[in-house]
Amino acid sequence: MNVHEYQGKELLAKFGVAIPAGYPALTVEEAVAGAKQLPGPLYVVKSQIHAGGRGKGKFKELPADAKGGVRLAKSLEEVESHAKEMLGNTLVTVQTGEAGKQVNRLYVTDGVDIAKEYYLSLLVDRATGRVAFIVSTEGGMDIETVAHDTPEKIATIAIDPASGFQPHHGRSIAFALKLKGDTNKQAQVLAKQLYDAFVSLDCEMLEINPLVEDVNGNLLVLDTKMSFDSNALFRHPDVFAMRDETEEDPAEIEASKYDLAYIKLDGNIGCMVNGAGLAMATMDIIKLNGAFPANFLDVGGGATTEKVTAAFKIILSDPAVEGILVNIFGGIMKCDVIAAGIIAAAKDVNLSVPLVVRLEGTNVELGKELLNNSGLPIVAANDLGDAAKKIVAEVNKGK
């Protein structure tokens, strides 16, 4: 689960992290009221969407030369003008895709006289199985270019979970940022605060970009992105309360109600499987046969007929889906339960696209019998390779 910048800063502030003053706003009036509480004379008006690249983004409804989703304002009148242009309009960034995201919230913060920008983030490093700091002296909007062109300017410091964060980790981070004197000491303290926040809140990613040094030598978190392990949110009701469903795909929200793992993709063949590994193999073999998956949908190992029916309806709610491949290996999951769910859903939604089903495992013969006697135009497949070839052939019949 992701949160907005202002929400992430609220969470970090509880761990003692230095954050410039700021106020969230849902309306133009709230944006101006927030600015009035700041010392000024420089303000920053920030679009709040779950995507990066806001500063270089463009609004669909505004002229091409209009400013992006993060703007400076030197007066309350400018704050008001920016808020009017940004709220309710669609911001397109490198991370949103062409569709963009509608800006429903703003964050008005105090301006900072920046002397230097840095990059600092924490994530779970799959290579080491540890929480790792990623730091660079080259912070700001072009960090992706830095990673591509000059990767030597990025340092990685992994933390052994057995020992946790130690003083030498803080010194290594400050050294990698080439900080000296009091700023070096601030970086060491900040690194420990961020690590504590990351672990305590069950984060998946915590990015500070930029981390800035102001003209007075103070380190401040100017922007942050935070995402959390959804499986651990039951431990953090305060974080879960920050969920903004307007930033999520409606189908993914619906799937979460049934404890389904669903992610929309760009293809035309819907996939329903049980198990993430089987899902990836299914998507790969669809591509191997010249087509593209429309989704990743894992019904899990203990799905009921109701759950399978819901999964089927979610797949069919995507107008891009031109065919469906069901690939189930029945271990804990029973093939007859899957078959009953497929039949119920297909009848309920008046199935109008080709459906190929491959079943294997527990109660497979009973499952196949149910499908064969359903009276539905279901194409049976013997194995995964056969299933992929058949669904691609069915989808391509009318083309």
Image: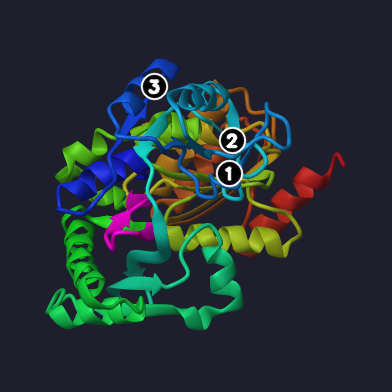
Q: Residue at x 62, y 45 (%)?
A: 294
In the image shown, does 197 or 67 lie closer to the viewer? 67
Query: Residue 342: where, in percent of width, then height?
Result: 51, 36
Reply yes or no: does residue 251 show up in magenta.
Answer: no
Q: Separation of disc 3 and disc 1 at Cα?
A: 27 Å
Left-right relation of 333 to 236: right
Name the image quarter holding the C terminus. top right
**Mark 3 or mark 2: whose residue is earlier in sequence:** 3
The residue at which mark 2 appears reads as: 91
- Given the image, on which type of amino acid does mark 3 rest? Val
- Given the image, on which type of amino acid does mark 2 rest? Leu
The secondary structure type at the circle numbered 2 is strand
User: How would you rate the neighbour count of disc 3 (Cα within 10 Å): few for under 14, some for 14-19, many for 20 or more?
Assistant: many
What is the number of callouts on the image? 3
The residue at which mark 1 appears reads as: 96
Q: What residue span does the magenta drawing correspond to?
A: 208-227
Proximity of marks 3 and 1: CB atoms separated by less than 8 Å: no
Name the image quarter holding the N terminus. top left
